[in-house]
């Protein structure tokens, strides 16, 4: 079953293709407009604005906190009743070093504040923090897709793997549009989608 959407699509595979096409186009617009540079790095409001911009043409819930509980495999994301508090706590986390930034990113992934599109929005959010705080961004083409998925899956318990992967892929090419767009690649997050499908509880 496809998520309810503004496009009237009922087939989940077709929706995934359209979502990829539209969100990539919107991500490029976000970059080209310079709007991203006006946002405060590391805040939930910035993440919500990124999400709204990417998905406003697809979902009514774009930029809005989810109102359902979600799980991926045996892992449950932050329960709805604690989500708002979790997001406030994450926003207060320090972000002046590489380790602090990745730890904040991991916590935001655990929170998973949106019904759909968390991965793409959070990668832009992560690079936005890296750019502002360290003058670096991740070259996602250097991060193996399967390694990334497994590292993110294990990150709530052990974040050393995701830190290693991301640190090895850092670059100072912070104004390279092509590098920016690599993080928005829908297939990047959905490699092995059936095995990592996020489900509503």
Image: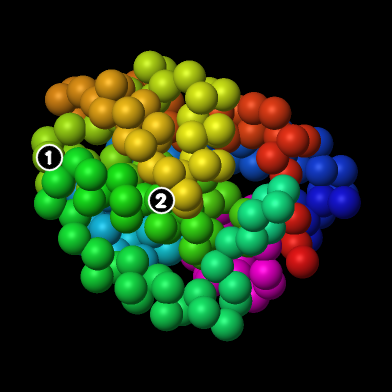
Way the structure is coloured: rainbow
Picture coordinates of residue 179, whole percent (x, y): 33, 24
Residue 127, by quadrant, is: top left
Q: Which mark is residue 103?
A: none
Picture coordinates of residue 138, whole percent (x, y): 30, 29
Apparent side of residue 199 relative to residue 83 in the rendered image (left or right): right
Apparent side of residue 9 relative to residue 37 in the rendered image (left or right): right
Name the residue tied to disc 1: 134
Picture coordinates of residue 45, whole percent (x, y): 35, 68
Query: Which of the two labelled residues, at mark 1 and mark 2, occupies the earlier sequence position?
Result: 2
The magenta stretch spans which residues?
A: 53-70
Please name which of the two marks, 1 or 2, marks the residue nearer to the observer.
2
Tell which of 192 and 20 is nearer to you: 192
Name the residue tied to disc 2: 106
- Figure quadrant of the C terminus: bottom right
* Residue beneath the point at 32% across and 28% down: 164
Picture coordinates of residue 95, whole percent (x, y): 19, 54
Figure label count: 2
Mark 2 crowdedness (10 Å alpha carbons): few <14, some 14-19, many ≥20: many
Instruction: Tell me if residue 137 can be seen.
Output: yes
Contact (Cβ within 8 Å) of mark 1 with mark 2: no
* Residue beneath the point at 49% across and 34% down: 151
User: For the residue labelled by badge 2, is the local secondary structure a helix, a strand or a loop?
Assistant: helix
């Amino acid at each position: 079953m496809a998520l309810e959407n503004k496009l009237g699509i009922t087939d989940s595979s077709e929706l995934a293709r359209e979502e990829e096409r539209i969100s990539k186009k919107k991500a490029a617009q976000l970059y080209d407009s310079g709007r991203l540079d006006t946002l405060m790095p590391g805040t939930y409001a910035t993440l919500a604005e990124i999400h709204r911009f990417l998905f406003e043409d697809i979902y009514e819930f774009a930029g809005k906190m989810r109102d359902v509980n979600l799980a991926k495999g045996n892992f449950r994301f932050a329960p709805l009743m604690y989500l708002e508090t979790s997001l406030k706590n994450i926003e207060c986390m320090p972000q002046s070093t590489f380790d602090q930034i990745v730890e904040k990113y991991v916590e935001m992934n655990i929170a998973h504040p949106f019904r759909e599109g968390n991965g793409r929005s959070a990668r832009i959010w992560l690079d936005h923090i890296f750019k502002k705080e360290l003058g670096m961004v991740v070259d996602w083409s250097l991060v193996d897709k399967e390694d990334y998925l497994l590292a993110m899956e294990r990150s709530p318990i052990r974040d050393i793997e995701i830190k290693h992967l991301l640190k090895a892929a850092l670059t100072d090419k912070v104004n390279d549009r092509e590098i920016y767009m690599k993080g928005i690649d829908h297939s990047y997050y959905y490699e092995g989608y059936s095995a990592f499908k996020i489900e509503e509880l």
